[in-house]
Image: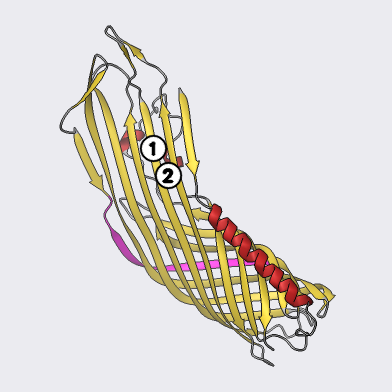
Amino acid sequence: MSELTKLSDSRADLRARLLATVCSAGLFAATCASTPGMASSEDRPTVWVELGGGFAQQQDDQQAYLPPFVLGSPPAPFVAQSPAIVEKNTPYSWDSDAKISFEPEGSDWVFSAAIRYGRNIADRSLTQRTAQQYVGPYRRSGYFAYQNVTAKNIESHMLLDFKTGKDVGLGMFGDDGESVVSLGLRYAQFDSRSSAGIQYQPTNDLATVHRFFGTFTDARKFVGLGPSLSWDASAGLIGNPQAGIVSLDWGMNGAILFGRQRTSGHHQTREMSVLVVAGNQYVHPTPIYITSGAPARSKQVTVPNLGGFAGVSWRYPNAKVSMGYRADFFFGAMDGGIDAAKKENVGFYGPFASVSVGIGG
């Protein structure tokens, strides 16, 4: 028995764009921070532009397409890997972020708009077959028992945040600290498209054998909007405002999203009878059976969202470089079922980095 597994994910372009964006922004921020005559701690910028990105591991447990003919027990001797492994989404993505904030001069208010976007593609195939040939009375037969699986998944997610916040720290984290409580609106959109094909022939002889085929396509989506509440805090560790400060940053966020889940797809299973005579294959003109399913569904849902982050920043009067770890979880956001509805959580968690540049003031 021999097994060949081919895995190919197209993420190189996204990684390159993300790296180029962060590096370019970091160089610009460093240049601004070291230029004489820029803003001081008393002349704080009123507009901040932030660019960044992160490596996000994903929680996505949508149901795999497993037709009845692959669920036999015990499995065929040549089956070393389940089709469910091939059909899984890529477990991570590279996300891009952008944010703009307005801090009126002489005020503790902060107004901001932010976007986060990520996309990944998983394109996989699996071939498993017996290495045994049948030697009959007429000729050697190369008729193998086999399993061929192909699967493709495309996932994307986008988050939009509009916030109005106020620094309520009142000096609790020192002169260089902040404690901003914000109210706002959060918009979330999750898209997932999947397809799979399975060819399965469990017998290897010179008699009538059975060949099974399964095909599956599915599109899932969630769109939601709702109020959000967040707390972002920062405490200076070392340094001074003129030369730069290293600070500890942390925050928490929550939202209630009101939206709609949608799923639409189709799957079909069929069996063909194959007659083998002297090594030649003859397929009957009509299949033994054909079954299909996966009805479309649409439902209004309420999705709780919780998240948070922790990290460190190098802060200058008109620039900031940050890195840390963040997480965002959306409970029951997607319908991950095939023939019946099945609530699935969506989550993103992993390291991030960003560069901010101050303008005006």
* One can see residue 93 in this view: no
Residue 15, position in %: x, y? 58, 56
Q: How far, Cα to Cα, is label 1 from label 2?
A: 9 Å
Give the residue at x 34% y 18%. 142
User: In which quadrant of the rendered view does residue 343 lie?
Assistant: bottom left
The residue that mark 1 highlights is 149
Q: Quadrant of the N terminus?
A: top left
* Kind of residue at disc 1: Val
The residue that mark 2 highlights is 87
Residue 176 lies left or right of residue 10; in this view the side is right
Up-down relation of residue 361 to residue 134 (above or below): below
Q: Main secondary structure of the magenta part?
A: strand
Residue 303, position in %: x, y? 44, 67
Give the residue at x 73% y 77%. 32
Give the residue at x 48% y 66%. 158
Residue 114, position in %: x, y? 55, 74
How many C-alpha atoms fall within 10 Å of the one at disc 2: few (<14), some, or many (≥20)?
Answer: many
The magenta segment = 294-310
